[in-house]
Image (cartoon, rainbow, N blue to C red):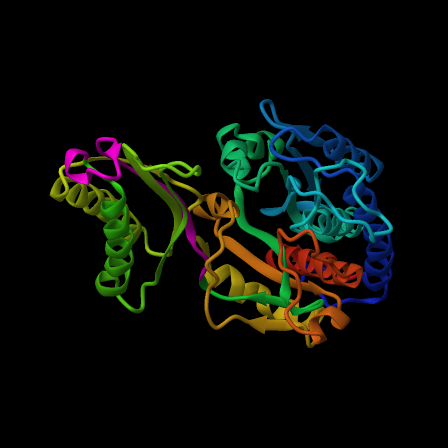
Amino acid sequence: MTHATEAPGVDDRLAASVERAHAHAVRLRHELHRIPEVGLDLPLTQAVIRRELDALGVPCTVGRGLTSVVGVIRGGAPGPTVLLRADMDALPILEPDGCEFASERPGSMHACGHDLHMAGLLGAARVLAEHRERFAGTVLLMFQPGEEGFHGARLMLEEEVLAAAGAGAAAPTASFAMHCNPWYPSGTLNTRTGPILAANDRFGVVLHGTAGHGSAPHAANDPIPALGELIGALQARIARHTPPFDPVVLSILRVEAGVATGGAAIPDRAELSGTMRTFDAALRRETHRAIERIAHGIASAHGLTATCEIEPGYPATVNDGAVRERALPVWQEWLPGRLRTLEHPLMGSEDFSYVLQQVPGVLAFVGTTPSALLDAGTPPDNHSDLVRYDDAALDTFVRAHVAFVAAHLAMVPA
């Protein structure tokens, strides 16, 4: 009688499957890179994913209001459910010449590595489907559009696509996603327990005054001096009223007042907008209130009125310690020398955070910059039209996904 064991190493059969999956993932990545699509409606990308899952005999469902795909791989015996996510959307960026598999859709580019995310998860799906009889439980493959500011993960959860796809299976008890990072050596898997990415909110303030002529400012109510005070006050609020171990980043990204032409008109409005990043939910809410309080206070002191708008973005991305600890020894075995622990979280944001609020799990970063670019100095970052990713890193995407499943579902040896 064969007994289930926990998390096997990479035996010969699995190693051969991973090698084949990596080669296929490279070809898929190039195909997906050529057809970047932006937002929530990604029919070309969805068609490739459905084609690949169909070829593996993996049933899938699609979203109603967005072109999501959820594949279901059922193991050879009942058990828990694990969720693996890859985002699908690209960015509205024109890709420059020089890439042999460059975008064929002018004005759109996979400049954040989501083509690697999808190809890596599809590669892992090949391994898991080939060895499905060896594990006890279910794997949900969550392919999500609209990560780049469109709240695609939240919309998928609201559509209950995951519950529908996993009908007859247990609710997911562990989740995992990876993201490209150009700052880390290619192929490394970088993660930590607790917050790993920040909440991201946008804010805007308009100060309303009275227009007039620059030769007679006393007859107007100029909002520009108040805008200058507001900029300083917001920066001072962060510097002097934020606990040093609970960081808040507030960046003013746009300031506008008056007209660009020459002349002497005092404008009747001045405005600014920016972004704020936080990890603590209570501090996030208090910073929202502080922006409004300071804006209205300065406006009132100058005899102006203020309009404030705060657009909540993604919540903080927080990794679950128990889920990560369970995966660590398996990652160490499957990815020798590639596993790294991040000392600090990053101030970027990710909507996998919505999944982590419902299913405990882990987000990790995969180093993806070719070594020649990394050795030359600061590599181009995500969202740059010059960013370049290393196909070799797809091996880590495939292995890390499969190892995560091996860590959380009982496996039987070959």
Which residue is at the far front? 215
306 and 80: which is toward the camera: 306
Identify the residue at image location x=37%, y=37%: 263
Seen in the picture, residue 226 relative to 327 is either above or below; the reply is: above
212 and 62: which is toward the camera: 212
Was residue 236 drawn as part of the magenta stretch in this picture? no
Identify the residue at image location x=66%, y=73%: 377
366 and 100: which is toward the camera: 100
* Observer able to see residue 372: yes
Quarter assignment of residue 368: bottom right
Q: Would residue 76 appear left or right of 241 to someone viewing this image?
A: right
What span is colored magenta in the figure?
Answer: 195-220
- In the image, residue 185 lies at what x, y percent? 68, 71
Q: Would residue 161 appear left or right of 257 to someone viewing this image?
A: right
Quadrant occupied by the N terminus: bottom right
Q: Number of marks in the image?
A: 0
- In the image, residue 114 lies at what x, y percent? 67, 47
- In the image, residue 65 lies at what x, y percent? 58, 23
